Image (spheres, coloured by chain):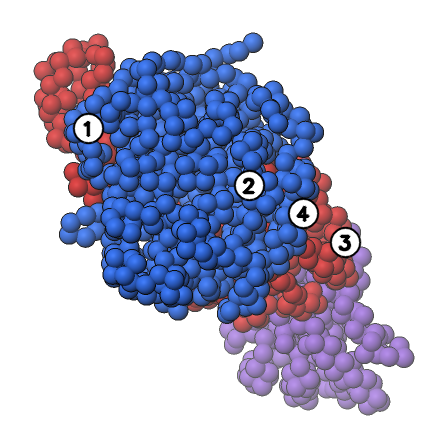
């Protein structure tokens, strides 16, 4: 008995496009899939798992680019802008999901599609146009080489009002592994989704929809959404910290805890943190608060200069192009941010690459002649900008730098201080000063990521009860809980920040009234989250990931923190990992046990070959 | 319940209706000099003018300001008997790194000052739980000795609290508090009345007062919360920041009293301020471009989510640097332009109304609108009706970019 | 330190006045409640000798605006081996039950001065313990005994009242005096809240000729804070008396 999901939050269908043949196929989204994985990350992971075989080349036509919205996307649920871009990462060779805001996901659903799956490869640089149910491919050679914001504007000008556009920059066109996908000044930055798009000769995807989005129980849904909005308006973080200072609001606190990675993670204390505090930005370069679709928080801040507008910097970008490289020059950081956005690369990866170069320079493994005459001194904003520009444009040494620190460390050595996990560069929280974050980096499904298990919440920011950041007891459970819950949130279509203020009961009520499906129980949602996280793990296991890959760079395991509240500490990863696997009900090699797979009903929706 | 507890509790919870409006003013002990409590005496004088049933203060302030509590029409005094660092999250100076707690006075001291009740936290969800429970047990025993009502504030706190188990944790904490001898409870709202009803369900008849937490965007939000929890059996509220940080604490308390003791509804109160013309004021600098206003408008009128059905609009500038909402300004250009007399003004709100029979769908009104918020869709004219005096767009705007002149 | 809150339950802070009814013999209380419970609920305070009458009629005392109740303590506590501990027990019991004050009579003027001395001992112990526990202490300054006469009455009242203040009473009650000036002098030397004792009370050694309303009005005019009614309530319509007294003391029936 498969009731249609159409009009119940969902559009009810998905579209599959083969760029090689031009074939367009419309696929129904089944209620069973909706109940099992909801949408967004969950749906994308399911589609990805089932549509590729092990070992597929991420830059080949077989690797699908999946755009998946959630059932709440496009509704009055708070911050209901989100959709996930899911694919196999060319940077890590593993699972990748990139959650993105803006307005694109909403428009996709209004065009009649909960998800779009793009496979194949166009014969020349092209653009996919989804005009309310009509899907076709157009020539985009006239967009070749354009920066992301330019390309987006030109596409909108050409197609007309109402279109929302995903686009890659020049870096994506060259399938640079750190290239991202950009829309409305937001991005799906990490892991090289932009490279996948580039490998398909796809410059842009434009969508316009005219179908209104409807829900199963309008009155009940409206009340649930209003209560959720009201909660967000009554929560210190979502009503004050984020709206006023954006994500940068935590920079000084993280630094005070000795957890702000500085100079390529040599230490966790940055002396000039006060220069780049949220307060400094607010009274300086930031001129406007900007919100994504339907969001009462408005965490984005627009920095104006005479010639450009930058949405940012947000915490990670600020950190990666700032303290990580020892830089505190705000103007330089904003410009570097703009460069990365314009050329379409991940700011985190870019910053980590620059800081790795700076460390190699300090160790005299690289001299300025090796890097096109740049004096890569710690804290030099000049060096930062030059290196960022090279990485963005692929000029000179930039050509190899943009391949990421893992590849660089293979060539130049210093693997111990190549700050990545599974090939994805490490984000802005020092694991030795927040051990839960360390475990989270090691076990994240897409490589080092701070979002899968944002234990910094409790370890560094003391929200909902502080947890000693340097202790390892209880961290494994914390990480498991956070990972499961984040996986669920990423499958609903609402933003992580909105979820700060909400419990699963409140999210469940919105889901249940929107879809009419039995999703109101907190435990049901928790299980979905756990299921999705195991699903992505199974994908990685299929690609060969084992315990040895759930690791951290030796710097974090062996070098003692030199200063700060976490002075002297290293990450006791093994201990936490053992506990983690037990709690996850995976074996000692990090493979989900068959009982676990059965308990989560995963065998019903994916085929397992071992 | 002992005689002393019964009498003292009746000074807090009005025996005529079993309800209470308590204002919390003990933040200084936990959070330092936050806005609203810097000059505590001045703030409390305003608060008291509104007529709360009781006020919660820390022991030092209790002694300093006991003169404010003198007299039988003065509020009853509640004394905070414990301290914690748990609420100092990153938004405060010296944020907590691990949860600590302490007693700050004895029940005997509170009796001497003349308090009618004492308040303590009870945290559930972290590693020091056992010790915390032991401390509360001591308080409970002292309260029994002195016949002093014990008000426990059960809160999920710590690493064992997740989004999935939050409601369950609230319930378990409430049960524990009841077990420890709470005479009343100060409980966080779980966000929706259904889950909160379950919380009330495990309180074993012990009166439940709901805490206010961080200040709401508008007093309308907090009045709604009060109304919701009373409907499912709460006995009242303990609101702190929502009162002391309001620009007019006395008015805030008065409005809350009307809901709690006056048994009025939020709608009763909101409707008082409706008088024509209900003008929507726009402060474009505050607009973030989220377009929730358009979504709310579309949903309220058509039950779907689609910007094209909204009766107002948000325009993004070419350079992406500004967002400007446009809403009906009640200029009545459309009324004057209509050749068929299909548009007229509503006397109660000042909004424009359309008579579907007289409307020919010519669209002249759409062109005449200087802010371009009239729409003709499939021959049907969509126009702003000010939502019968309480515009939805204003309600949903989290930025205060849309307001009603002289209203909410 | 004395709890301002407890004093505030007795003396209305807006006018710093009060009407207390002495129900130490129990009968007055029952009679009043039987006749008009509302008027009882509007009084400022009731003095009782034992706690049972309060407990049995707890509905009268529920809620914030209900009358306060005050515990009368007599010299029996001095007969125990440890008077201070005995008094402490009383005071703690009073606090447990949310009494707003303790009241005791101080007499001076017996030939056997040991009686005067005992009376002094009682109020010193009471005053100390009450102060420790923040409980207001009311002393009725009542010169009584063979040595008290109409010639030395006003000076004796002055003496007893001042002694009560020196010992630490928070409120002092004094009997009416024939001469208003004398009463004014007594009040000036007290400096703390002063109440008039019911002219018909048994312990008033020198009876005066004036009616209760006249006496009360003059007392209030020179700054006294109210009255402790007792025997007058048995002489006629107690409800009417209370209404009259209330309009005099508070200006209206509160």
Horizontal and vertical percent position of residue C201: 72, 70
Q: Are marks 3 and 2 on the same chain?
A: no
Q: Chain of mark 3?
A: B
Q: CA distance from mark 3 to mark 2?
A: 49 Å
Q: Are marks 2 and 4 on the same chain?
A: yes
Q: CA distance from mark 2 to mark 4?
A: 15 Å
Q: Residues within 10 Å of mark 3 (few under 14, many from 20)?
A: some
Q: Chain of mark 4?
A: A
Identity of the residue drawn at 57% across and 61% down: A558
Question: Which chain is red in the rendering?
Answer: B
Q: According to the image, label 4 marks what residue?
A: A579
The colour applied to the residues of chain A in this rendering is blue
Q: Are marks 3 and 4 on the same chain?
A: no
Q: According to the image, label 2 marks what residue?
A: A483
The colour applied to the residues of chain C in this rendering is purple
Q: Earlier in the sequence, mark 2 or mark 4?
A: 2
Mark 1 falls on what kind of element? Answer: helix
Q: According to the image, label 1 marks what residue?
A: A141
All told, the count of numbered labels is 4
Name the mark on residue B147.
none
Identity of the residue drawn at 22% across and 34% down: A152
Q: Residue C240 lies in what quarter of the image?
A: bottom right
The quadrant in which the N terminus of chain A is found is top right
Q: Is residue A174 above or below residue B41?
A: above
**Of tags 3 and 4, which is closer to the observer?**
4
Q: Are marks 2 and 1 on the same chain?
A: yes
Q: Look at the numbered discs 1 and 3 and tell me whether their residues touch, using CB distance below 8 Å.
A: no
């Amino acid at each position: 008995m498969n009731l249609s999901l159409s009009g119940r939050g969902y559009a009810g269908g998905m579209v599959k496009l083969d760029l090689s043949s031009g074939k367009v196929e419309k696929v129904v989204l089944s209620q069973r899939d909706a109940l099992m994985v909801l949408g967004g990350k969950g749906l994308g992971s399911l589609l990805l798992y089932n549509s590729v075989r092990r070992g597929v080349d991420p830059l080949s036509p077989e690797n699908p680019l999946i755009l998946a919205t959630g059932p709440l996307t496009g509704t009055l649920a708070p911050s209901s802008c989100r959709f996930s871009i899911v694919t196999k990462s060319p940077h890590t060779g593993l699972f990748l999901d990139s959650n993105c805001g803006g307005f694109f996901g909403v428009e996709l659903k209004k065009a009649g599609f909960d998800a779009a799956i793009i496979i194949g490869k166009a014969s020349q640089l092209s653009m996919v146009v989804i005009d309310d149910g009509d899907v076709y491919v157009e020539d985009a050679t006239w967009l070749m080489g354009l920066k992301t914001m330019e390309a987006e504007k030109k596409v909108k000008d050409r197609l007309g009002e109402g279109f929302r556009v995903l686009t890659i920059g020049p870096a994506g066109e060259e399938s640079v592994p750190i290239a991202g996908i950009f829309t409305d000044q937001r991005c799906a930055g990490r892991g090289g989704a932009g490279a996948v798009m580039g490998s398909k000769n796809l410059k842009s995807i434009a969508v316009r929809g005219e179908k209104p989005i409807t829900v199963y129980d309008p009155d009940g849904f409206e009340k649930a959404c209003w209560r959720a909005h009201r909660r967000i308006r009554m929560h210190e973080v979502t009503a004050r910290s984020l709206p006023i200072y954006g994500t940068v609001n935590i920079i000084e606190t993280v630094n005070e805890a000795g957890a702000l990675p500085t100079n390529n993670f040599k230490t966790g204390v940055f002396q000039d943190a006060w220069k780049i505090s949220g307060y400094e930005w607010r009274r300086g370069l930031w001129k406007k608060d900007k919100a994504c679709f339907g969001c009462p928080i408005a965490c984005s801040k627009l920095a104006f200069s005479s010639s450009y507008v930058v949405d940012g910097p947000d915490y990670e970008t600020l950190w990666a192009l700032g303290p990580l490289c020892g830089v505190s020059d705000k103007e330089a950081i904003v410009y570097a941010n703009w460069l990365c956005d314009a050329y379409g690369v991940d700011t985190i990866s870019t910053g980590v690459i620059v800081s790795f170069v700076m460390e190699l320079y300090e160790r005299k493994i690289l001299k300025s002649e090796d890097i096109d005459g740049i004096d890569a001194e710690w804290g030099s904003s000049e060096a930062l900008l030059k290196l960022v520009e090279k990485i963005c444009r692929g000029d000179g040494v930039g050509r190899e730098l943009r391949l990421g620190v893992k590849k660089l460390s293979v060539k130049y050595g210093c693997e111990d201080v190549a700050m990545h996990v599974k090939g994805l560069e490490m984000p802005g929280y020092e694991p030795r000063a927040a051990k839960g974050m360390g475990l989270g980096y090691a076990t994240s499904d897409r490589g080092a990521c701070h979002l899968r298990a944002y234990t910094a919440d409790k370890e560094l920011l003391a929200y909902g009860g502080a947890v000693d950041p340097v202790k390892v007891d209880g961290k494994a459970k914390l990480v498991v809980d956070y990972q499961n819950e984040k996986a669920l949130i990423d499958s609903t279509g609402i933003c992580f920040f909105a979820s700060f203020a909400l419990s699963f009961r409140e999210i469940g009520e919105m889901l249940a009234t929107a879809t009419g499906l039995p999703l109101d129980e907190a435990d049901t949602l928790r299980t979905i989250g756990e299921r999705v996280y195991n699903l992505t793990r199974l994908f990685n296991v299929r690609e060969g990931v084992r315990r040895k890959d759930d690791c951290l760079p030796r710097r974090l395991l062996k070098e003692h923190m030199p200063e700060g509240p976490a002075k002297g500490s290293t990450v006791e990863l093994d201990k936490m990992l053992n506990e983690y696997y037990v709690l996850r009900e995976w074996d000692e090699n990090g493979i989900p046990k068959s009982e676990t797979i059965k308990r989560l009903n995963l065998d019903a929706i994916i085929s397992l070959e071992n | 319940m002992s005689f002393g507890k019964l009498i003292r509790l009746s000074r807090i919870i009005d025996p005529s209706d079993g309800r209470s409006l308590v204002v919390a003013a003990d933040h200084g002990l936990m959070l330092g000099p936050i806005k609203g409590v810097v000059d505590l005496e001045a703030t409390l004088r305003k608060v008291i003018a509104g007529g709360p049933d009781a006020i919660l203060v820390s022991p030092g302030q209790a002694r300093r300001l006991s003169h404010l509590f003198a007299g039988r029409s003065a509020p009853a005094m509640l004394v905070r008997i414990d301290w914690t660092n748990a609420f100092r999250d990153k938004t405060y100076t010296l944020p907590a790194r691990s949860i600590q707690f302490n007693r700050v006075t004895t029940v005997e001291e509170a009796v001497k000052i003349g308090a009618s009740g004492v308040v303590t936290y009870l945290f559930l969800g972290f590693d020091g739980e056992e010790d915390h429970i032991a401390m509360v047990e001591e308080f409970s025993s002292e309260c029994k000795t002195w016949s002093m009502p014990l008000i426990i504030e059960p809160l999920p706190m710590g690493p064992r609290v997740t989004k999935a188990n939050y409601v369950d944790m609230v319930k378990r904490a409430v049960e524990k508090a009841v077990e420890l001898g709470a005479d009343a409870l100060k409980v966080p709202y779980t966000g929706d009345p259904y889950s909160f009803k379950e919380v009330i369900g495990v309180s074993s008849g012990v009166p439940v007062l709901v805490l206010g937490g961080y200040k709401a965007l508008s007093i309308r939000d907090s009045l709604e919360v009060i109304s919701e929890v009373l409907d499912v059996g709460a006995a009242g509220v303990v609101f702190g920041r929502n009162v002391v940080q309001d620009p007019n604490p006395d008015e805030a308390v008065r409005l809350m009293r009307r809901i709690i003791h006056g048994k009025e509804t939020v709608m009763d109160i909101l409707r008082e301020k409706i008088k024509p013309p209900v003008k929507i004021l726009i402060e474009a600098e505050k607009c973030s471009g989220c377009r929730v206003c358009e979504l709310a408008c579309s949903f309220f009128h058509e039950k779907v989510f689609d910007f094209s059905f909204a009766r107002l609009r948000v325009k993004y500038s070419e350079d992406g640097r500004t967002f400007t909402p446009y809403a009906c300004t009640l200029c009545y250009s459309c009324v004057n332009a209509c050749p068929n007399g299909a548009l007229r003004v509503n006397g109660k709100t000042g909004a424009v109304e359309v008579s579907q029979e007289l409307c020919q769908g010519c669209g002249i009104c759409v062109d005449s609108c200087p802010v371009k918020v009239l729409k003709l869709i499939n021959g049907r004219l969509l126009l702003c009706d000010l939502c019968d005096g309480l515009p939805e767009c204003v309600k949903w705007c989290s930025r205060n970019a849309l307001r009603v002149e002289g209203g909410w | 330190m004395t709890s301002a809150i407890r004093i505030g339950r007795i003396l209305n802070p807006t006018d710093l006045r009060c009407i207390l009814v002495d129900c130490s013999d129990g009968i007055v209380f029952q009679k009043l409640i039987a006749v008009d419970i509302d008027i009882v609920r509007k009084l400022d305070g009731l003095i009782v000798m034992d706690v049972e009458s309060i407990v049995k009629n707890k509905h009268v005392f529920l809620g914030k605006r209900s009358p306060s109740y005050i515990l009368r303590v007599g010299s029996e506590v001095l007969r125990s081996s440890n008077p201070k501990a005995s008094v402490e027990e009383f005071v703690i019991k009073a606090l447990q039950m949310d009494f707003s004050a303790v009241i005791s009579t101080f007499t001076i003027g017996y030939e056997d001065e040991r009686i005067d001395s005992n009376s002094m001992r009682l109020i010193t112990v009471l005053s100390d313990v009450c102060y420790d526990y923040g409980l207001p202490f009311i002393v009725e300054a009542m010169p009584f005994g063979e040595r008290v006469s109409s010639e030395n009455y006003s000076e004796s009242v002055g003496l007893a009242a001042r002694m009560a203040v020196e010992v630490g009473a928070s409120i002092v009650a004094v009997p009416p005096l024939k001469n208003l000036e004398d009463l004014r002098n007594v009040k000036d030397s007290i400096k703390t809240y002063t109440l008039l004792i019911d002219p018909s009370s048994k312990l008033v050694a020198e009876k005066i000729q004036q009616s209760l309303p006249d006496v009360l009005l003059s007392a209030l005019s020179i700054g006294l804070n109210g009255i402790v009614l007792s025997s007058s309530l048995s002489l006629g319509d107690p409800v009417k008396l209370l209404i009259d007294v209330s309009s005099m003391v508070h200006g209206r029936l509160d």
